[in-house]
Amino acid sequence: MAEVSLRKVVKRYDEVEAVRGIDLDIADHEFVVLVGPSGCGKSTTLRMIAGLEDISDGDIMIGGDVVNDVPPKDRDIAMVFQNYALYPHMTVAENMSFGLRLKKYPKAEIKSRVDEAARMLDISELIDRKPKQLSGGQRQRVAMGRAIVRNPKVFLFDEPLSNLDAKLRVQMRIEIKKVHQKVRTTTVYVTHDQVEAMTLADRVVVMNHGRIEQIGTPNELYHNPATRFVASFIGSPAMNFIPCQLEDAAGKLQVRLTDKLAFPLPPARAARYQKVSRTDKLLLGIRPEHITEASAHAEEAGVENFDTVLDVTEPMGMETLIYFPLQGAQVCGRVNPNAGARDGAPLRLAVDLNNMHLLNEVTGAVL
Amino acid sequence: MTTVTLDKAAPTRKVKYGSMSRDRTWALRWSYLFLVIFAIFSLTPPVYMLITSLKSSAEISAATNPWWVFHPTIDNYLGLLTSNQFLRFFWNSAMVSVFVVTITMLISVPAAFALARMRFWGSTVLATGVFLTYLIPETLLFIPLFKMFAVIGDFTGIQLINKWYVLLILYPTLTVPFCTWIMIGYFASIPKELDEAAIIDGASWFQTLTRIFIPVALPGLIAATIFAFTVSWAQFLYPLVFTTSTDQLVMPVGIITTLIKGDVFNWGQIMTGALLGAAPPLIIYAFLMDYYIAGLTAGATKG
Amino acid sequence: MVDVALQSSQAAVRTARKQSSLRNLLNRKSTIAFLMALPLILLIATLVIYPAFYAIHLATLNKSMARFVGLGNFEFLFKRETFWLVVKQSCIFAITAVVFKALIGFIVAHFVHNIPAKGQRKWRGMLLVPWVIPPAMSTLAWLWLFDPSYSAFNYTLGLFGAGPIPWTGDANWARFSVILVNIWVGAPFFMIMYLAALKSVPDQLYEAAAIDGANWWQRIWYVTLPMMRNIIAITTLFSLIVTFANFDIVRILTAGGPLDHTHIFATWAFRVGIEGSDIPLGASVSLFMVPILAVAAIFILRDISKRGNEA
């Protein structure tokens, strides 16, 4: 068990910088998820921690030791790959014990470790099968078992669930969480799926263009995103961004969307945005669940009503997603299935400004 | 628009449907007919070898129906299999082939692994070079090689010409490039994550090769082995040029130079010898046909 | 992924700070890789590339190899009638044989592909036998089938009142015979390659073509051939090289006779270089194979790299 630290880590391929100076401290026992769109450098970062890629600059420390030039096998890590990377000619037991056998562990210990890991992952009865005879989910378990038996300082997962179908992915997600609760090994997990990141992580690291956008717990990222990228990447359906401007009206601050539509800000928000320039081009960031049908709200502070005509509605069963245009943006809201939302129908909506965000349109910073 | 075309097609459609299955049956009949013809064409020489090998010299010179054995005899087989000379050819061939297969694998498997996975300065050029080398026929090289070995003999006193083991140096030029090429193909098709997993599990490069790559690419290895064996067994030009003493000859050259004595052709024995010479590749082919064909098609379909 | 590894080594070179890691890298990977490939490099360098250039050197010497004669050997060859016979016969032999091998291979592959899948293995197995038998051995069988006095073919023709045919005795019949044997040996290779290619054409394409109203000939022309173009090209070029450089069949069947009419470059080079002990002249003869081999090789390489790009 160990903490992992990255200090100004850079990865260059010829002229391209894939990773541009990352600082990250991962505590012992922590489950950290690196998430971001493809090409954001998350996998490269993981592979540098594993030692599969050399680092161009900076330092990587595992358990306090700088491991920049330590080969992968001496870093005491285990890795689970996207395509499982099970050795096709070995049985499940052989796959799991390969690393231990190379290190010349006593036979009895290998057996007890493999048996224990198999029991933990519920694959005891598959132990003599070849990978070819296993389903995708079972292969994934074996790949995890191979990591567990090594009892390493750090687990590294490289998009381990992306080859599974949606249903199995949810199931394995829970499985991974259970395993981590049992073994408590420091884990770095890479995924492009923000749901996976949110559900698994103690802390989520959102990456974009080789840089870290934000580090935080899932709830921090969701409720207090630092940048427009994080705000739009986390959450589904994504946050709405509506062009707007701040203005003073009768001593109170309000956010103006169109000539006819402006919302007065609730006191807490008004205080926060007091210093923002009134001429800046801004975006009003509001999550779909904060745009609901007006009838759901009795007069609440900070909740403002307005009328619109819906473009499209998507009934999801427990709720209906509605879409309507506003200031050139396609805005999404979530209403009760009984709210009477129909394609092309007018509807009175309520927006909860207590949960609004204000972003600078140019810099993308959340104010 | 679509309805119009459908209407037009409708009357002919019916007839066509009826004839579809009839067409199919006829196509099948024609296929079988031609396949039988081609099979006869393919199998005539080996079958004729067998027929002749079962005949005595007297029956052959009597010029009876050549396609039939009236008095089958295994004298030709007994004669050859008890002849020290013939057994010597067989032994030489076997030794040369086994050694060449071993040498080929020792050279081409590590090289293919290095070229497919590790990459070093000039490795891409080398991979192409390996393929080009495979395209250079032995008929282009036998004269300079002959002279080279003669010169080496003159300068160092190491006589390689007219020794069976000179073939151990020559044959790998025919087997190694192709085997390396197809092994590169097989190794390259192994997912990259597999060796990364092995590295993380603590395997060295050598262990990755022996414990992961070779077992996983075993079908390719078998195909390459079969190729190396059949090429060494069948090679005719090099032993014809480089070996002359009867105790140094391998099967193909031995049969042709010793069984054909001047104008006296003992056809019964020649055909028996040819059949015995063809037997090892045929037996391997019979048992490992799929690997044989995989190796055959790998040259153009891999890489 | 492999390129990444290559690039990472270059990146490390540029970063001066990483001197130790560079050394590590060399120790770990490139050096080991180079050492693993070294036997291959040595083999190719000493036994293929060196002799190839040595052949050029040899071709410029006189018969006793004591004097440099420049292009003298070539001038001598150009004046000899036999040389031009060999050039002509080599081209006739290679082109005719390859064309027929390709055609027969294509047709047979189609028939094998046509029949139910469970029988295909058996037929494929039988039809590939000529390729498996060492050519030197099978050519002996053909030699016996063509025997001037006991030819089994002539016996069979005699039953129909035809023949006898001087299979290896008459110049034109001998040319026919060596080509026939070459086709017999080589056609199965084409058959196997085409069969593999046919199997790789997705059935949906034929079904789509059938729905579009294509008859079987149109299906071959518009679906099969375009899909197989690459394999056909590569196989043909391969075979062209091998056939052009053939030795065994001609050597055993006719030994170049009658009167040098069936000699091709390889057998004639053997005749003058080894049997006639004129190594420089033999080397000169064999060098005439280089241009056509080079052209074929360039086309093959282009095809292979093209496919690499597609993948």
Image: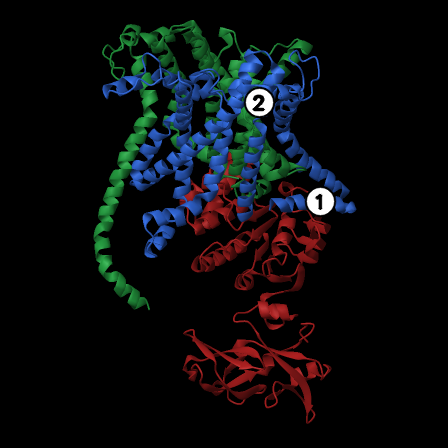
Give the left or right position of residue A110, taking residue C161 as reference: right
Residue at the disc numbered 2: C286
Residue B145: tell me if it is visible.
Answer: no
Chain ID, mark 2 = C
Residue B134 lies in what quarter of the image? top right
Residue at the disc numbered 1: C10
Give the left or right position of residue A175, taking residue C198 as reference: right
Q: Nearer the viewer, residue C259 or C297?
A: C259
Residue B247: tell me if it is visible.
Answer: yes
The residue at the far right in this view is: C16
Element on which disc 1 rests: helix
Q: Nearer the viewer, residue A107 or B104?
A: B104
Q: Is residue A329 above or below residue C130?
A: below
The percent coordinates of residue A112 (x first, y second) are 49, 40
Q: Nearer the viewer, residue B191 or A192?
A: B191
The tint chain C carries is blue
> Residue A160's mark?
none
Asked if labels 1 and 2 share a chain, the reply is yes
Q: How many marks?
A: 2
Residue sitting at 29 percent across and 41 percent down? C116
> Of the residues shown, which amino acid type is indicated by label 2?
Ser
The percent coordinates of residue C238 (x first, y second) are 50, 33
The residue at the far bottom in this view is: A250
Chain ID, mark 1 = C
Q: Which chain is red?
A: A
The tint chain B carries is green
Cα separation, mark 1 vs mark 2, equals 44 Å
The percent coordinates of residue B105 (x first, y second) are 54, 27
Q: Nearer the viewer, residue A233 or B80?
A: B80
> Of the residues shown, which amino acid type is indicated by label 1?
Gln
Give the left or right position of residue B244, taking residue B15 as reference: right
Q: In this figure, which colouring scheme has been used for the structure?
A: by chain
